[in-house]
Structures are given as structure tokens and as C-alpha cells.
Image (cartoon, grey):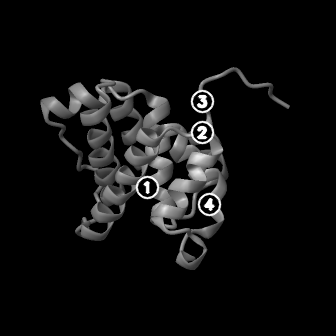
Amino acid sequence: MFEVLVYLYENYAFAVGKHDQWPDADALTRKLSAVGFDADEISEALEWLQGLARVSQDAVSVRDARGESFRSYASFEVERLGHEAIAFLSFLEGQGQLCAAQREIVIERALAMARTDDDWPVPLTKLKLIVLMVLWSQQADVDVLLLEELLDDGDDRLLH
């Protein structure tokens, strides 16, 4: 599923907010199949994106957190997200890269993925992609350094 999401981001990021440039679900399914993605992966990814759209639409404005406030995680959230993912979300929020509402959407979508994937705790590479997809869906301005971090798959890179 995540390979499909990466492909969609790489090929349709320019079309955010330009719904006339997005193919309909059937055409998109055909395009993804033609590229070589499995039908189940395509279906899961499109369903996940529909869930993201639904959650984003239904998101209640969350009051900006003050410096002394914090997010308390339920035990099942800690189990499924893992400490590394929770620390990363806290870091992004502390740096002003995620607002509280976006954090909640990321958590919901990560837990939705964990329900179907049984890949617990959520690997940091997958959480980064979820963050990227949430920011993309919200047409948020993404800092270049954050974008580089979110796209980092953990492989060694040559520094210039």
C-alpha cells in the first residue's frame, strides 16, 4: 500500500487543490495497474486516502496547544504507534511543523494502517509517509528540510 502512496505523491503532488487534474477512481486504478501495482495494494491505498479525506473533512478545529500542554496517549496507541513514532510526532509539533489537529489526523491514519497491516509498532518510515500525506492533503507548506526528513527512507546518503 505504501508504495502506491509514494507513487501517487511523486506523480500527483502538483495537482493538490486542482481536482480537475486528478483522474477518477476507475481511471486511477487502471493507471496504477498499468504501472504494475497489485489490485489489493491499489484498493487499500485508495481506501486509505478516502479515509484521510473523510477524517480531514470531519476534523474539528483543535485549539492551538500551549507550551505547557501535552498529548496523553492511550495504551493501545502506544502499542500500535510505538515510542519512536510518538517521539517523532512530538518533535514535529514542538518545531511547529504539525498543529494539534494535523497530529490527530496522523495518529488516526497511522492507527487505521496498523489495523490492516499488523505491522506494529508503526515503522518510522511509514509514519513519515503518513505525515507527508496528511500535510499534502491539507495543502500545507512543508519546510524543505522537513520534506527531506520525511522522504528519507533510512538508507545511507552521500552528503554534498
Label 3 SS? loop
Q: Nearer the viewer, mark 3 or mark 4?
A: 4
Q: Please state which amino acid type lies under the numbered disc 1.
A: Val
Horizontal side of residue 113 vs 97, given as left or right: left
Check residue 153 in the rendering and tell me which mark sits there, or answer none. 3
**Outermost left residue:** 75
**Residue count near mark 2 (Cα–Cα under 10 Å), binned few <14, some 14–19, many ≥20:** few
- The answer to whether residue 19 is left or right of residue 49 is right
Q: Earlier in the sequence, mark 3 or mark 1?
A: 1
Residue 56, given in percent of the width and then of the height, sits at 33, 64
Which quadrant would the N terminus be assigned to in this image?
top left
Query: Callout 1: helix, strand or loop?
Result: helix
Instruction: Residue at 25% x, 65% y: name it.
Output: 62
Badge 4: few (under 14), some or many (20 or more) residues near its Cα, within 10 Å?
Answer: some
Q: Which mark is residue 12?
A: 4
Tell me the SS state at disc 2. helix
Q: Identify the amino acid type marked 2.
A: Glu
Name the amino acid, label 3.
Asp
CA gap between label 3 and label 2 equals 9 Å
x%, y% of residue 157?
74, 25
- Residue at the disc numbered 2: 149
Q: Earlier in the sequence, mark 1 or mark 2?
A: 1
- The dot on residue 89 is none
